[in-house]
Amino acid sequence: MHSSAPVIAFKAVSKHFDDFQVLKDINLEVGAGERIVICGPSGSGKSTLIRCINGLETYGAGDLRVNDLRVEAANLTAVRRRVGMVFQQFNLFPHLTVLDNLMLGPIRGRGMGQGEARAIALRYLERVRIPEQAEKYPRQLSGGQQQRVAIARSLCMEPQIMLFDEPTSALDPEMITEVLDVMAELAQTGMTMIVVTHEMGFARRVADRMVFMDYGEIVEVAPPETFFTAPKSQRAQDFLQKILNH
Amino acid sequence: MMTMPLCVWPRHAAMRWMIGLTAFLALSGCGANWGWYVVNPATASGYANLKFMLSGLVYTIQLSATAIAISVVVGLLVALPGLSGNIWARRASRTYVEVVRAVPILVLILWVYYGLPQVTGWTIGVFWAGVIALALSDSAFQAEIFRAGIQSIARGQYEAAYSVSLGYRDTMRYVILPQAIRRILPALGNQLVYMLKMSSLVSVIGMQELTRKANELVVSEYRPLEIYTILVLEYLVLILIVSAGVRWLERRLRVDERS
């Protein structure tokens, strides 16, 4: 489906915390515009895996590249310019208004002027459908609104790749849909996305490929229709049984 | 953010005490053991004495303000390496704090004024000797305050800043420090009050601040009780004003976040 050179390439990536191996020999290539959903039991290394991509975690062995740029200390600024990230806890800057949250990256990270940054911030705020909240502070917003602001904040950097680390896990159930809708819309624009989530309905609708992880390794990679109906590994079958039949 | 009171008394109690104290002093002026005439503004000599005492105020304020400004900057510069991943930077920061904190302020003042010129060959006036000694001493405490404040900011704030391509300096300047400073404002206010009080020690090297003026007046008038009582009131009023200012600043910054 994706013939061009991969935008993200893991080659034999491993990581240890003391004796505990969090990532075991990870090999994964992600093509431009591809939507990957990573699932697996907690502690399986999903978050660690995507946090390696923008260098929030270091890896021990192997080779990880974003656009042929090796992810390592010297390249981090360049890598982070291309990779946006949305966190489980939103991590908005509480002392700044929504607008300032959005403008900080473009001004300080991309070297834009105030006016240009403001225009871009308003554009993406519109896109996540909360332009009227521009002058408010994060704590005045609901969880769902905060997470949409966080998505807009990443988009203001106009990244090639978006990483989502359990973006709906800290939300009240009634707010999950509004965030997933924004993500699904983003997927339609051709953005390369890697999403760690337990929202299997979203995965089924949006993912090109499912990646199932357990104990720090990638156990299975399959298109959603295959993965959800006929998972090959026993571990994936057990996992799906647990989360789909509750 | 919780506000911590800057002084032990609540503000209104402090006011009541001051009124009570003033009333007591005014009434006791009739007693045989008191000689308020030395500072009675109604008489020419009393007025001159009061004016003489108050003339130290500007130096006390200049000295403390300069010293605290320098110590905040130095404190931050000491605190940041203390939080880095480099073990040598951390050790250097730790050592600075431990060593400087261990020297009594009075000893530091004497050493800077009498010792430092001999080591360096510079001539250092009383004002700058006082500033250097107070700033040096306070910087160790400021460093600890900054360290605690910065450490109280969640990891996710750094990660979010890094993920929108901010480097370490911009992350500190626009994300971490603005939040940390709001949290440590009460502690910084305490240091400012502490510094105002400790500036009285600079009188030993001849700095013409409040305490020195009072000492000189006591020598010529021989009325220590009245003169030192006035001195106490001078510090009390000064510090109550500063405390109120810090509280106002705290309120303002807090409103900023909520409105």
Image (cartoon, coloured by chain):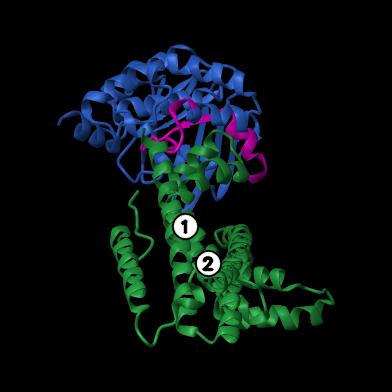
Chain colours: A blue, B green
Q: Is residue A98 magenta?
A: yes
Name, please, the residue furthest toward the front: B43
Which of the pair B109/A160 is nearer the observer?
B109
Between residues A32 and B46, which one lies in front from this camera angle? B46
Residue occupying the point 27% across, 25% down: A176
The kind of residue tagged 2 is Leu
Seen from the viewer's position, the closer of residues A177 and B82 is B82
Give the magenta range.
A73-99
| Badge 1 element | helix
Percent across and percent down for residue A46 are 40, 39
Where is B135 relative to A5, above or below?
below
Give the number of the disc on residue B242. 1
Residue lying at 30% horizontally and 68% vertically, measured from the top left: B20
Where does residue B246 sit, x and y in percent of width and height? 45, 53
Q: In the drawing, what numbered circle is on residue B135? A: none
Farthest residue, direction left = A246
In the rendered image, which quarter is residue A146 located in? top left
Residue A158 seen in render = yes
**Which chain is mark 2 on?**
B
**Amino acid found under the numbered disc labelled 1:** Val
Q: Which residue is mark 2?
A: B196
Visible residue check, residue A217: no
Q: Residue furthest top?
A: A188
Point 77% across, 73% down: residue: B124
